[in-house]
Structure formats: structure tokens, C-alpha cells
Amino acid sequence: MKIQVLGTGCQKCEKLAESVGKAASELNLDCEIEKITDLNQIMEFGVMLTPALAIEGEVKVVGKVPSVAALKKLLA
């Protein structure tokens, strides 16, 4: 599974990346977590507000940092 955290490196973006890592770890997922900070790449996803989360290339979350529990539901 490929998980992409889209954001420029702001505090919320870092928190989302940390929460995604924790959720994936708790679920024992075999996944690759990629942080995308390049604005052009972020815009290619159609994302205009960060942080955002894409799973297998599909944007699932935009502009917020869900709880670890909510992320686990998205990833399961």
C-alpha cells in the first residue's frame, strides 16, 4: 500500500505524517509512506489546501489532521 502525505512541511503536515505512521504501525500494515512537499506535485493531486492524505493515489483527506482512530479506519 502506498500512502502519501501532501504538505509543505508545516506543523499540521508533520502531525499528519506522524499520525499516519502511528496508525499504520498499530495496524501492522505493509506500506510505504511518502511525504510530498513540492507544490507542483501537490497540485497534480488537485489539492489546494494542506495537509492532505492520499492512499494509492486517491485523495482521502484535505485540510485537516484526523485522529489516529479515524486514520486507522481509512487505512483498514
Image: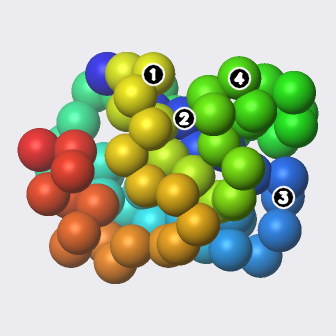
> Which disc is residue 57 wearing?
1
The residue wearing badge 4 is 44
Q: Earlier in the sequence, mark 2 or mark 3?
A: 2
Instruction: Determine contact: label 1, label 2, CB under 8 Å.
Output: yes
Q: Secondary structure at mark 3?
A: loop
In the rendered image, which quarter contains the N terminus?
top left
Q: Secondary structure at mark 1?
A: loop
How many residues crowd around disc 3 within 10 Å: few (fewer than 14), some, or many (20 or more)?
some
Q: Earlier in the sequence, mark 1 or mark 3?
A: 3
Instruction: Determine contact: label 1, label 4, CB under 8 Å.
Output: no
Q: Quadrant of residue 23?
A: bottom left
Residue 36 image offset from top left, x and y in percent? 73, 35
Question: Marks 1 and 2, how far apart in space?
Answer: 8 Å
Residue 7 image offset from top left, x and y in percent? 74, 51
Question: Marks 1 and 3, how far apart in space?
Answer: 20 Å
> Which disc is residue 9 wearing?
3
Residue type highlighted by circle 3: Gly
Residue type highlighted by circle 2: Gln
